[in-house]
Amino acid sequence: MITIGLTTWTEHPSLLGGTEKLTLTEYSGVLPVVEVDTPFYGIPKVTTVAKWQKAVPDKFQFILKANQVMTLHDTYDEGVSMDALKTAYREYRAMLKPLTQHQQLKAVLFQFPPFFERSNRNFHYLQRMVEWLPGVPIAVEFRNQSWYEESVKDAVFSFLKDLGITHVIVDEPHALNDGVSFEPVVTNSKLALLRLHGRNQQGWSAKGANWRSQRTLYRYSDQELAEFKQTVEQLQQQADEVCVIFNNNSGGDAADNAMALKELLGVSFGDLGPHQLDLF
């Protein structure tokens, strides 16, 4: 199975051929999965998650980012207290219940900061994550190239496989001191996950107040999408589901690229919302 989605639902008016921000219901009439980053900044209330569920078809699924406490952002050097970690995981598990009970959680995405390097301490933390989120599908995105050094990356992939963690296959600008390499490796036979950030090297390294608007400013070419098609088809041989998330949002290119890849792959998504009838 192949699924395709985007990060957030409001920023993609071209899915409906308009210029207005989309509602979740409108988005779910076109694509079967969405990645939500709001839990990174603050763990939503269960009532908020329940509202999301009411807005989408029964088989629609969510990828939720792990909270910043759980990914050790901004507190790594001095460490995170065990109480703070346990509280975050407890609240996060409670928030997930409506989704896990109805099979609407595709994965919890741990997007680690660039300073989360390969170390014994961090290997141990990956183990603790699985213990603290029992039965929850977990996907890990590394942003430090140390995890992909030639001499150790096979051992890293084997470690993730043993834990049942999905290795996130990342496409982003990659230079010697910035970004990670593209590693299309499956570590969980249930789910292979690609996150496509674009290849804007200058924007990826941008500093200053507007760096967020530059980082994912990129439109994949037809040739690049054809290459992703080949990758997806290869991954299909190794995983029950291959999910592709486009995160090249800054210029409004993610939706168009997603629909182009959908066409290339010749896939269709059933059981979507009512807007599917309006589009096709």
Image (cartoon, grey):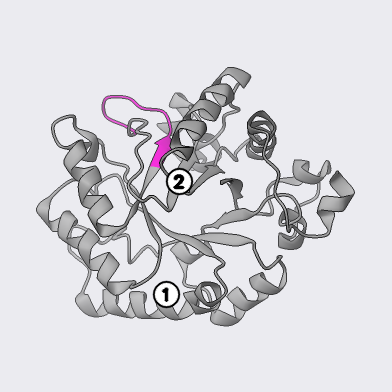
Query: Quarter holding the C terminus?
Result: top right
Report whether 54 appears left or right of 166. Answer: right
Report whether 137 appears left or right of 242. Answer: left
Q: Position of residue 81 (x, y in %)?
A: 21, 74
Residue 187 is inside the magenta segment: no
- Is residue 203 visible in the rendered image? The answer is yes
Residue 175 is inside the magenta segment: yes
Q: Position of residue 35 (x, y in %)?
A: 55, 55
Check the image and name the residue furthest to the front: 237
Which residue appears at 53% of the width and 77% of the height?
A: 101
Image position of 31 with respect to 150: above or below: below
Report the label total: 2
Dividing the picture into quadrants, the one containing residue 48 is bottom right
Count residues near mark 2 (Cα–Cα under 10 Å), then give few for <14, some for 14-19, many for 20+.
Answer: many
Q: Which residue is mark 1?
A: 92
> Under tag 1, what secondary structure?
helix
Which residue appears at 28% of the width and 66% of the height?
A: 130
Q: Nearer the viewer, mark 1 or mark 2?
A: 2
Query: In 3D space, how far apart are the residues under numbered discs 1 and 2 (Cα atoms)?
Result: 21 Å
Which residue appears at 48% of the width and 27% of the height?
A: 199
> Under tag 2, what secondary structure?
strand
Image position of 25 with respect to 196: above or below: below
Which residue appears at 10% of the width and 53% of the height?
A: 120
Q: Earlier in the sequence, mark 1 or mark 2?
A: 1
Q: Which residues are magenta?
A: 169-179
Q: Which residue is mark 2?
A: 193
Of the pair 80 and 28, the residue shown nearer to us: 28
Tell me the chief SS of the magenta region.
loop
Q: Position of residue 25 (x, y in %)?
A: 75, 62
